Image (spheres, rainbow, N blue to C red):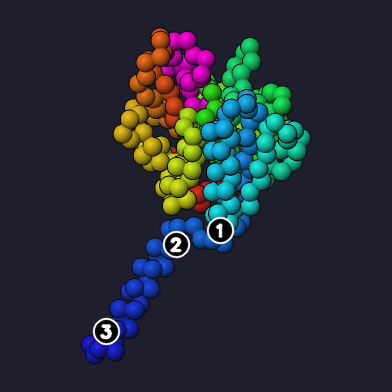
Amino acid sequence: MNVKTKFSVLLTVLLFFSLKSNSQKPTRVYFHSLKAVVVLGAYQYGDTMVINSAYRLKNYLKSKGIRTYFFDGEKANWSTIKRYAYGANIFAYIGHGGHDANTSGGLVLRNLVSREKVAKELKLHHNALVIMEYVCYAAGSAADDQYTLTLQNVLGRVTNYARPFFKAGAGAYFAVDELDGAIRFLDKFFQGKNIESIFKFMTFPFDRIEIIKPSAIDSTMKIGIASEKINQGQVKKLYNLAFIAPSNFTYKDLKR
């Protein structure tokens, strides 16, 4: 084989692996075809850390080239939000968790948007990703918990919070009780990592995986719950991370 032939073969091999590598990651064009809605729930005076985290998430999504709509729950009403959320590939909510006399769920805007309204009126793109950040009940624990919850309690809370979004078209649900947790998740998600592997990555080194098992919503999906040890009166454990989705759910599923 002469030098020219060797060089040609080398170029072919490099091109093959370059194309293969690029095919594993989303392109700028792919991001431009996505639509995201970020909702900052109604907040109390002084919650500047929560507010700033929501704005950082909005800016992060825009920096990826994703068409992003941002709503401040103190000002925006549900009718406006659901109109812009029609067909959204990503729906993120940051703020207070909804809860009524019966169960947890919904969005806290100027008024509580019930689980029923979310299920019936929100129309997301098929297989959309729903992210809950710093939302009581959404990942399991709530700020007003007076005792350590059982795992069964937590499974019920997370399932109740997620179910309306799946009825609205979602294909995956991820909840994290950590400011900027959504960006931390999306960094890995947009690299092509699947949702279960990101869940496991985000538990390291302080959190403990409590369970990963088939979900009550759909047996083809899994539910994962993680916790960390705390010492707040009778509350000894904070359930702060959860997902419900097919284990291998990746960014490629957002447009299927």
Residue 184, compared with residue 132, is above or below; it is below
Per the rendering, the mark at residue 23 is 2
The one of 225 and 227 positioned closer to us in this rendering: 227
Say whether disc 3 or disc 1 marks the residue closer to the N-terminus: 3
Say which mark, if any, is on residue 6: 3
Closer to the camera in the image, 108 or 29 = 108
Q: Main secondary structure of the magenta part?
A: loop
Residue with the most extreme left position:
1
Q: Tags 3 and 1 in contact by the CB under 8 Å rule?
A: no
Q: Position of residue 39 (x, y in %)?
A: 63, 37
Amino acid type of the residue tagged 2 in the rendering = Ser
Say which residue label 1 marks: 30
- For numbered disc 2, what is the local secondary structure? helix
Judge depth for marks 3 and 1 and give the one in front: 1
Report how far apart the C-alphas of labels 2 and 3 lie in the structure.
26 Å
Q: Which element type, helix, strand or loop, lies under badge 3?
A: helix
Examine the image and state in which quarter residue 227 appears.
Answer: top left
